[in-house]
Image (cartoon, rainbow, N blue to C red):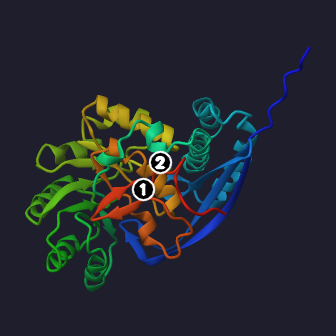
Amino acid sequence: MTRKRARSPIRLDWTPIDLKLRHAWTIARGTSVVKRNVLTRIVHGGIEGLGEAAPNARYGEDAATVRRSLERLAPLLGDDPTRPEEIAVRLEAELPDRRAARASIDIALYDWIGKQQGVPLHRLFGADPARAPLTSMSIGIDDIPVMQEKIREAAGFKILKIKVGLDNDRKILEGIRRVTDVPLYVDANEGWKDPRSAVETIRWMQGMGVVLVEQPLPAADLDGVRFIRDRVDLPIIADEAALTVDDIAPLARAFDGINVKLQKSGGLLMARRMIERARSLGLKVLLGCMIETSLGITAAAHLSPLADFADLDGHLLIEDDPFRGVLIREGRLVLPDGPGLGILGTW
C-alpha cells in the first residue's frame, strides 16, 4: 500500500521597503515624502510568488500592522496555493479589516498560480490586454508653479488627475489650465464638507474641462453626495466609501461609479468581485492604486481591461522602483505577457 505523500506548507516571507517620493505628496488629508510598504513572497513547490502591501492610515493600517497581520495569517495559508478563494475565506475571517496585508498575500498567490500555469494574470482573469484603458497621472496639491512643473513632467499622459479639497481649488485649476488642456479628473479625498458649495465648484470645474469627480464629501455622507449628483452632469466616483463588495449596493443611490483598489479591497480576488458587483448595478469602475512599486501597480493593471477608467500611476511617484512591469505608452497601459505578474525584479 502506497502512503500519500504529505504536502509541505506554503512558506510566507516579508520585508519592509521605504519608497522615497519624487515630490512631496499632498492630498486633502496631509503630506508625505516617504512611503513604507511591505513586500511579500510565498514559496511552494520550487515556485515563488511576489506580493506587496501598500497600507494607508485612512483604513487603519501601516507597515507595522501589516507585519503583525502577516505573522497571524501565515499559519492559515495551508499547503495548496492553487486554492486562493479558500485561502481568502480563512484570511478574511481572521483579520477582516487588514485588507492591505491580505492583498499582499493574494497578489503573491496569483503570481504563483500564473507562474505555475505559465500564463499572465490577465489571462487568468479573462481580461483582454488590448482593451487596457488610458491611465491618468496624479498631481498632488502643491504651490501652483510646482504643480505646473509636475504637469510638464507628465507630458504624454492624455488625462491628469488633480488632487483638490483645500481652499484654493479654483486657483489650482486656473493655474493648471495655463500649462495644459488635457481632460482632468479631480479627487477631493473627502475634503469638501458642504454639498451646496460642492455643487457650485463642480459646475465651475466642468467648464474648466473636468470630466470626473472623485469622493467629494466624507465617506459617510451619502445623502450629501446624492444631493450633488442630482445637480451636476459629471460622474461622481466613490473611493474612500467603497472598500468591500458589501459597500457597493448602498453607494449606487449616491454615486455613478466606484474606485476599486487592490489595497483597500483585499487583493485581486476581492477587486474582481467588486468590479462584477458594480457592473451588476450599472456603476462605472475606476481602477486605482496607492503609492506602490511596479509590483503592486502591475498586479492591478492585469485587471484594468475590465474597468472604464484607470489611475495606475503610483509607481511613477517614487524614486528607485525595484521592479519593472506594466508600461505606459502614450498614456495607455501596456500589460506584460510573462507568466504571473510578468515583472522583472525580486527581493
Q: Please, what secondary structure does the residue beneath circle 1 have?
A: loop
Q: Quadrant of residue 5?
A: top right
- The answer to whether the residue labelled 2 contacts the one labelled 1, judged by CB atoms less than 8 Å apart, is yes
Judged left or right of residue 311, residue 9 is right
Q: CA distance from mark 2 to mark 1?
A: 7 Å
Q: In this image, 121 relative to 27: left or right? A: right
- Front-lying residue, 254 or 39: 39
User: Amino acid under label 1?
Assistant: Cys
Secondary structure, mark 2, is helix
For mark 2, does the 10 Å Cα neighbourhood hold few (<14), some (14 to 19), or many (20 or more) residues? many
Looking at the image, residue 16 sits to the left or right of residue 291; the answer is right
Residue position for label 1: 289
Label 1 neighbour load within 10 Å: few <14, some 14-19, many 20+: many
Residue sitting at the far bottom: 145
Residue 303 — which label? Answer: none
Residue at the image point whose x is 80% and y is 37% from the top: 8
Residue closer to the observer: 65 or 45: 45
Q: Is residue 120 left or right of residue 285?
A: right
Residue at image mark 2: 262
Task: Tell me, yes or no, if residue 190 can be seen here.
Answer: no
Q: Quadrant of the N terminus?
A: top right
Q: Position of residue 255 (x, y in %)?
A: 25, 42
Mark 2 / mark 1, whichever is N-terminal: 2
Q: Residue furthest left?
A: 207
Residue, x 64% and y 54% (percent of image)?
66
